[in-house]
Image (cartoon, rainbow, N blue to C red):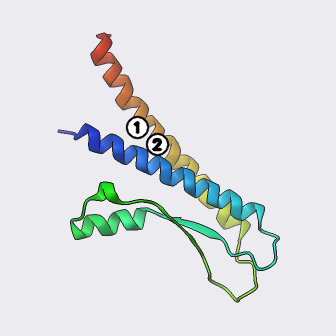
Amino acid sequence: MIDIDRDTAFTQRMLDALSRRAKASLHNVANQNVPGFKRYEVRFEELLKKAAEKGEDESAVEPVVQRDESGPPGVNNVVLMEELAILGKTSLLHDVMTRRAGSYFATLNKAIVGR
């Protein structure tokens, strides 16, 4: 049996993380030519995995936006092709999650309306 509240909460949290990731990646692309700019990254999946491995409540996991301080100080660490790959992956995952949510609500609508 599927826990509806937990499933929809996970879908919502995942969509939020994907939205933050897309915004961070777009911000990185916009600043790719700024000297000394350090890119932003969003961590969510690995935090979710760690919570599951420890047996903690996965619904409490929040996406974390952090600075990637790799590379020499004062040198921009944005790689355009990597950011575009992140945007492509994010777009695909967003599509999957919105279809998942849409399917759930379509089924719920059928149960209510009866068609």
Q: Quadrant of the C terminus?
A: top left
Task: State left or right for residue 78 relative to residue 4.
Answer: right
Image position of 115 with respect to 64: above or below: above
Check disc 2 and report the residue beneath it: 96
Query: Which residue type does callout 2 highlight?
Result: Val
**Residue drawn at (73%, 62%), measured in percent from left and top?**
29
Residue at the image position 44 percent from the left and 50 percent from the top: 14
Image x and y of residue 4, in percent? 26, 37
Q: Are marks 1 and 2 in contact (CB under 8 Å)?
A: yes
Question: Secondary structure beneath disc 2?
Answer: helix
Q: In this rendering, would 58 be left or right of 21?
A: left
**Relative horizontal placement of residue 109, taking residue 2 as reference (left or right):** right
Q: Amino acid at mark 1?
A: Arg
The label shown at residue 100 is 1
Where residue 7 appears, x then y in whole percent? 30, 43
For the N terminus, the quadrant is top left
Q: Residue at x 70, y 60 (%)?
A: 27
Residue 54, image x and y in percent? Answer: 23, 70
Q: How far apart are the two marked residues, 1 and 2, measured between alpha carbons?
A: 6 Å
Q: Secondary structure at mark 1?
A: helix
